[in-house]
Image (cartoon, grey):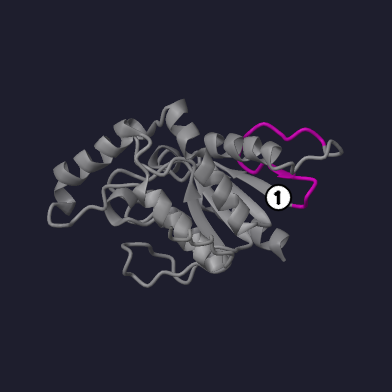
Amino acid sequence: MAKRKKASKDPAEQWLLLQRRIVRCKKCPRLIAHCKAIAVKKRKAYADQKYWGKPVKNFGDGRAGLLVMGLAPGAHGANRTGRMFTGDRSGDWLYRAMHKAGFASQPESIDREDGLELINAVVSNVCLCAPPDNKPSREEVANCQPFLEQTVSQVQPKVVVALGRLAWMEILRLAKELNWFDGSEEKPPKFCHGAEFRFSNGVWILASYHPSQQNTFTGRLTEKMFDSVFSRAKKLIK
């Protein structure tokens, strides 16, 4: 009988294995079907491009001081390019702000081969497949929770930036499971842009409105507001 290969304890290899499990995930038939359908139909502007069309892995090299947590891949952004927050307006805002704060090597994120590298940062989403109308169901979010837990456990961030209410609530939920609370801290504030909270283990969570067009086009989220969150994250990590 062949011996079962022992799981590697090397953090870099564990990180790569996590990304492979994410891409192979088939837990949500509705989302898998939607990602594939978008990849076939495509947007006219990208008709000549091959879409990724499957779950999108984390972007970054594992251990990092900053973890950015969004909602879900964009249908014609990350679902097209195969990299978190890449190829759409939300990504334009995110990586420009991260570049200003020193977390990204360049302000643009066009495709997986554009040379962008993150610096002491990882970018992920609560839901790792592009959902119809950008609204994953509760069950679909729950199906991704093990990936969220593994991502946070492997990254071991000092600061988590939650882009939107759902990301904020999911990180707080996970923090309870991971015993980041010891009862001595005050109750976390409700989600609002600029809200922040320090867990008893020293990890900070910062809240920002999501850089979606719904927020940036209406002025609900301005460039100055967004930059301030990443500037604050930089100070807390130092």
Residue assigned mark 1: 204
Count up the numbered dots: 1
**What residue is drawn where x is 70% and y is 37%?**
176
Quarter of the image for the N terminus: give it.
bottom left
What residue range appears in magenta? Answer: 186-202
Compared across the picture, whether 125 is left or right of 52 comes to right
Q: Relative to the observer, which residue lies in front, 61 or 120? A: 61
**What residue is drawn where x is 52% and y is 39%?**
145
**What residue is drawn where x is 64% and y is 35%?**
173
189 is within the stretch colored magenta: yes
Query: Looking at this rendering, what residue extends furthest in the front direction?
Result: 1
**What residue is drawn where x is 30% and y is 31%?**
30
Q: Relative to the observer, which residue lies in front, 223 or 85? A: 85
Assign the magenta stretch its main secondary structure. loop
**The quadrant where residue 214 appears:** top left
Task: Give the class, few, some or many, for how many residues have Cα within 10 Å of label 1's Cα (few <14, many ≥20).
Answer: some
Residue 228 seen by the camera = no
Amino acid bearing label 1: Trp
Q: Relative to the observer, which residue lies in front, 56 or 191? A: 56
